Amino acid sequence: MTIDEEKCQHILDAAKRTGRNIRVTFNYRYAPHHTKVRELIMNDTIGQVTSVHFEWLLNTRHGADYFRRWHRDKRNSGGLLVHKSTHHFDLVNFWIGSQPETVFAFGDLMYYGKENAEERGVTQFYNRATGNELAKDDPFALHLDSDAHLKAMYLDAEQEDGYQRDQSVFGDGINIEDTMGVLVRYRNKAILTYSLVAYQPWEGYRIAINGTKGRIEMSIVEQSYVNSLGDKKLEGALVGKTLRVLPMFDEPYEVEVEEQAGGHGGGDPVLLNDLFGEPAEDPYARAANHIDGARSILTGIAANRAIATGLPVQIQNLVRF
């Protein structure tokens, strides 16, 4: 929705001042496997949720892409804890029906960037990949002249503003983190431990939700993706998934989730209908407003502040709702 608390306050104030409605399109809520988790918790399958562990992995294709482009400057993107993790923080808010109160985090640039490459023995560096012999055999390089869509979208348009889409992930000027750990306490006293690593061999996430009657475990492998590459691959497209319930005093069992046609397992068409069609009654309350958006980004914004200061951050001290 935005990248810092000041801009977030402007949005909250504008909504209050004008009385207009704001919709935030959290497409992850609508993915069938995410909705199923909400349903299981609503049906008291594992009792009261007490803690959530969320491990998110970005691979060396999609994850690296954030370090080639404008996201690498936190002044533009807010870092991955705002730009990417806001989806995940919203999912936790959505699943457990609560809101974050206290946030602490650690984070650092530990793989990408010139200094890290030098420590691993790299001696040859380049600023951008396109037309550069040093980037010829670099698996992290993005060559804008190798794809007609990329060439038209970015390379041919550089004269407009000078933006370079194919910067080296091991260059200077990267000030976002690639390795992060976040701890969140919610109003209902549940605890979230969250991990994000942006340089792994596969992409997806593992989630464990613990409750007073049992545990939900979900593992998702997602399709590798590079933004605007022109290959029509869908971000969030599933490669594999498992969803299990482990009751406190019974045998674990697999939960079947039926995927539909469309992005995010068929969730996108439902979201689009909610936005532009005639919404059906939704027992899961997936439609989100600016308050939901603010609560998701504020977890990442607070985590950024905690990384910078080494201190826990109270959400109530960031904005006025």
Image (spheres, rainbow, N blue to C red):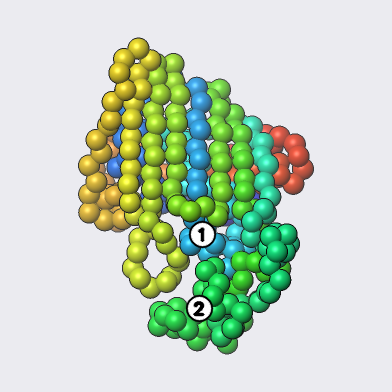
Where is 247 relative to 29, above or below? Answer: above
- In the rendered view, does 44 fall on the left or right side of 9? left
Residue contact between numbered discs 2 and 1, judged by CB atoms under 8 Å = no
Q: Nearer the viewer, residue 13 or 217?
A: 217
List the single residue furthest toward the right.
309
Q: Determine whether the residue tagged by mark 1 lies in a helix, strand or loop.
A: loop
Q: Quadrant of residue 163?
A: bottom right
List x then y, in percent, for residue 212: 44, 16
Callout 2 amino acid: His
Q: Nearer the viewer, residue 276 or 49?
A: 49
Q: Which residue is mark 1?
A: 60
* Residue lying at 75% horizontally and 36% vertically, measured from the top left: 311
Q: Secondary structure at mark 2?
A: loop
Tell me residue 56's x, y (percent). Answer: 50, 45
Q: Nearer the viewer, residue 286 or 319?
A: 286
- Check disc 2: other Cα within 10 Å, few if <14, some if 14-19, many if 20+: many
Which three-letter amino acid code belongs to the residue tagged 1? Answer: Thr
Give the mark, 2 or 1, whose residue is nearer the N terminus.
1
Residue 148 image-quadrant placement: bottom left
In the image: residue 283, left or right of residue 105: left
Residue 143, label in figure: 2
Left or right of residue 21: residue 14:
right
Q: Residue at x 34, y 26 (%)?
A: 245
Instruction: Using the rendered image of the protein, determine whether residue 121 is visible from the camera's viewpoint.
Output: yes
Quadrant of the frame with the C terminus: top right
Q: Local crowd at mark 1 within 10 Å, few (<14), some, or many (≥20)?
A: some
Separation of residues labelled 2 and 1 (CA atoms): 16 Å
The outermost residue toward the top is: 249
